[in-house]
Structures are given as structure tokens and as C-alpha cells.
Image (cartoon, rainbow, N blue to C red):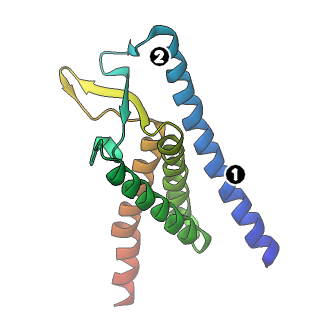
Amino acid sequence: MFKMNYKNNLSNLIIILFIFLIDRVSKIYILKIAELENIVDIYITSYLNFYLIWNNGIAFGLLSSNENLIYNIITLAIIIIIIVVLIMLVNTKGFRKYCLISVAGGAIGNLFDRIYYSAVPDFIDFHINDIHWFIFNVADIFITIGIICLIFEEIFVNNKKNEKIT
């Protein structure tokens, strides 16, 4: 039984590291372009640009602040949330496990940037005509997909289980 848990936790860690590496490679690539060109403003399609900004808030620039105390409190809260997600991951199976892995991998990627750069590089600018969504990064994609899947799993799967019980 110990080997099964060890093997399961090792595979979880490998997937989290893979997500982290995908995020790191994408950010390093954009930062290298910024270093060479002094700015990143790359037209990809009529709906997608790469435009580098530095985010010192949380997801989508929310709670951005130049105050070190606020930044440090937010960073500490993120660390606590990551620890809670990792603890939940140890005791979770099935689809929910992969949702939590996605959230953890993305969150660790953004936490690394918060600690290393004191801000998170965001660069994916999705837009329709002149209506722009928040600028985000690959880690944000994994976090968002993981959370959306957790919500759907809770609403549709767990709700049906609860209906069968009653």
C-alpha cells in the first residue's frame, strides 16, 4: 500500500513539474524577446497578441499594489493556498486529482515568479476587435482550467451523487 501511495504521489509531482516547466519555458522565451527587443508587442492573429506586462497582484492583476506589506501578505496567502491544495491532492482520486494538479502546477509557476522577479510576467493578450480580456500567462491557464473543472465536477458529479443518496 505504501508503494502505491508513493508511486501515485511521484506521478502527481511529475505532472506538477511538467506544468511548471511549460510555464517557465514560455515566460523565459517572452523575457528573452523583451531583453532583445526592449518591448514585447507581437501580433499573432487578429484575436491574439503577446504583450508583456508585469503583474504584482493576483490573477488578472487583481489586488495589485506597490506596498511591500500587501505584496508579502498576498504572497504568504498564495503559499498557504498551495500547501492546502497539495494536502488535498494527497487524499484525492479521479478527475478531481487532475484538477488540483493543474491548479498546483500553475500556482507554483506564478509563485516562483513572485519570489524571483517580485512580479509575474503576463503576456497572452486575447481580444476581439478592441475588446481585450485580461493579459495572462500559461500558469493562469492551468489554474483557471483546474478551477473551472473543479466547479463543474462539484456541480454536476457530486450533485448527482447527493441526489442518488437522498
Residue 165 x/y as whole percent: 39, 89
Task: Give the vertical position of 138 relative to 107 (above or below).
Answer: above
Image point 47% across, 43% down: which residue?
Answer: 114
Task: Give the vertical position of 141 relative to 155 (above or below).
Answer: above
Q: Secondary structure at mark 2?
A: helix
Q: Residues within 10 Å of mark 2 (few under 14, many from 20)?
A: some
Image point 51% across, 15% down: which residue?
Answer: 35
- Amino acid residing under circle 2: Ala
Residue 164 x/y as whole percent: 38, 84
- Amino acid residing under circle 1: Ile
Residue 136 is drawn in which quadrant? top left
Picture disc at residue 138: none
Task: Give the vertical position of 114 relative to 53 (above or below).
Answer: below
| Closest to the observer, 102 or 40 | 40
Q: Secondary structure at mark 1?
A: helix
Q: Mark 1 and mark 2 in contact? Answer it, CB < 8 Å.
A: no
| In the displayed structure image, the side of residue 91 where residue 58 appears, left or right | left
Image point 50% across, 40% down: which residue?
Answer: 113
Check disc 1 and report the residue beneath it: 14
Q: Is residue 24 visible?
A: yes
Residue 85 x/y as whole percent: 51, 65
| Closest to the observer, 94 or 53 | 53
| In the displayed structure image, the side of residue 106 where residue 18 appears, left or right | right
| In the displayed structure image, the side of residue 32 where residue 153 appears, left or right | left
Image quarter where the N terminus lies is bottom right
Dot 1 or dot 2, earlier in sequence: 1
Check disc 2 and report the residue beneath it: 34
Q: Is residue 43 visible?
A: no
